[in-house]
Image: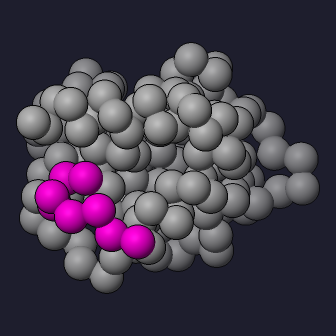
Amino acid sequence: MFGDFLRRLTAPDPEPMSQPDASLALAALLVRIARTDGDYAQAEIDRIDRLLASRYGLSPFEASKLRTEAETLESEAPDTVRFTRAIKDAVPYENRKEVVETLWEIVLADGVRDDDEDALMRLVAPMLGVNDMDSNLARQRVDARRE
């Protein structure tokens, strides 16, 4: 189903992504972060749906459909590097900081800060071109909203 998308994503010199493809890549990255700890909790699924709806102006049904497509893509995709490269190429830096904040929302959605999720965030943020300080500030903003 996603063969063409994955071929474009994994090309040696990929073309910049269209907005729908960038949305799908981000959604797949959110799913990958949520699945990292081996517990893809309903709280994480609900948070992904809300974040996608808010970020892209989608109805709850459309957000759920995008997440479902992203779940399939995430399971078929070879690695995180290609998702992050696609997002980095398609999204300006200021918006990538928002992407990192969105990823932290998923990491913290179930109320547990898992070591595997933390490790993936330490890998993903720099691959998105977001420095450690901005990633840490994004995490702090998410933490502050949860209190």
Q: Is residue 100 above or below residue 13?
A: above
User: Toward which corner of the image does residue 14 lie, by quadrant?
Assistant: top right
Q: Identify which residue, 21 or 39, lies in the foreground.
A: 39
Q: Residue at x 41, y 72 (%)?
A: 115
The answer to whether residue 70 is seen in the rendering is no
At horizontal 16% and vertical 60% (from top left) the residue drawn is 110
Give the overall secondary structure of the magenta segment. loop
Q: Is residue 15 magenta?
A: no
The answer to whether 16 appears left or right of 95 in the picture is right
Return the residue found at the far right: 12
Q: Which contiguous range is marked in magenta?
A: 108-115
Question: What residue appears at the point 31 percent right and 28 percent down from the top-left corner?
Answer: 141
Q: Where does the image place residue 74, in percent across and percent down from the top left?
A: 47, 67
Left or right of residue 137: residue 18: right
Q: Position of residue 134 (x, y in %)?
A: 54, 29
Can you give x and y, in whole percent of width and height, for residue 146 in the image?
Answer: 13, 38
Instruction: Quadrant for the C terminus, please.
Output: top left
For the residue pair 18 and 138, the one nearer the viewer reads as: 138
Number of marks in the rendered image? 0
As drawn, 71 above or below 96: below
Seen as rendered, the residue at the extreme bottom is: 38
Q: Quadrant of residue 45?
A: bottom left
Residue situated in front as seen by the camera: 15 or 97: 97
